[in-house]
Image (cartoon, rainbow, N blue to C red):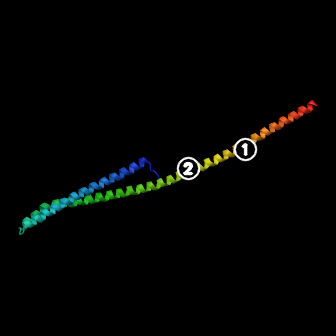
């Protein structure tokens, strides 16, 4: 299997881990606010049950005292939803970036494989050319040796003629 550069893998893993932790923190805060909201609603329900026939001013004062808390909860929930959407966007960008890096890596690995194949075929061709040249050199050496032998015979024949 193709291996990614260790630094690229570490950076991608770090970015994904950071995005995951941020998303997890937002989800935990959202759950805490949801629990707080549910507790507030339970208190309101409890207050409503206790005040079965409350005077109008008691109920309105109870609602007013809880209104600020409800507004804070709604604002916090909206903020968390926006932060969660931002984290999701960042995470999708990291995923897209990782996919692009993966495609680039595959392209580079293909190019490296092609270059290796070309290098190996070049080495094979060079080896074959070297073998051919060595064979030609051996044939030339044999021919030179044969010519040297012929030259020696001619020299002997000439010496023999001169001696006659």
Q: In the orientation shown, which residue stands out farthest toward the bottom?
A: 53
Q: CA distance from mark 1 to mark 2?
A: 30 Å
The numbered disc on residue 116 is: 2
Which part of the image, by quadrant, shows the C terminus? top right
SS label for mark 2: helix
- Residue 100 picture location, percent across and down: 44, 56
Q: Residue at x 33, y 51 (%)?
A: 18
- Residue 9 picture location, percent across and down: 41, 50
Q: Residue at x 32, y 56 (%)?
A: 87
- Residue 142 picture location, percent across and down: 76, 40
The answer to which image quadrant residue 97 occupies is bottom left
- Residue 75 is left or right of residue 45, and the answer is right
Q: Residue at x 24, y 56 (%)?
A: 29
Q: Nearer the viewer, residue 146 or 6?
A: 146
Disc 1: which residue: 136
- Residue 30 picture location, percent across and down: 24, 58
């Amino acid at each position: 299997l193709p291996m990614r550069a260790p630094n690229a893998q570490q950076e991608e893993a770090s970015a994904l881990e950071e995005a995951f932790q941020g998303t997890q923190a937002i989800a935990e805060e959202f759950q805490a606010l949801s629990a707080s909201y549910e507790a507030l609603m339970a208190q309101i329900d409890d207050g409503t049950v206790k005040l079965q026939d409350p005077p109008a001013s008691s109920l309105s004062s109870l609602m007013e005292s809880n209104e600020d808390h409800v507004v804070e909860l709604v604002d916090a929930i909206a903020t968390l939803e926006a932060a969660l959407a931002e984290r999701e966007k960042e995470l999708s960008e990291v995923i897209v970036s990782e996919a692009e890096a993966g495609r680039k890596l595959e392209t580079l690995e293909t190019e490296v494989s092609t270059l290796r194949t070309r290098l190996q075929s070049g080495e094979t061709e060079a080896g074959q050319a070297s073998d051919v040249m060595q064979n030609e050199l051996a044939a030339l050496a044999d021919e030179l040796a044969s010519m040297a032998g012929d030259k020696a015979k001619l020299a002997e024949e000439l010496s023999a003629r001169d001696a006659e």
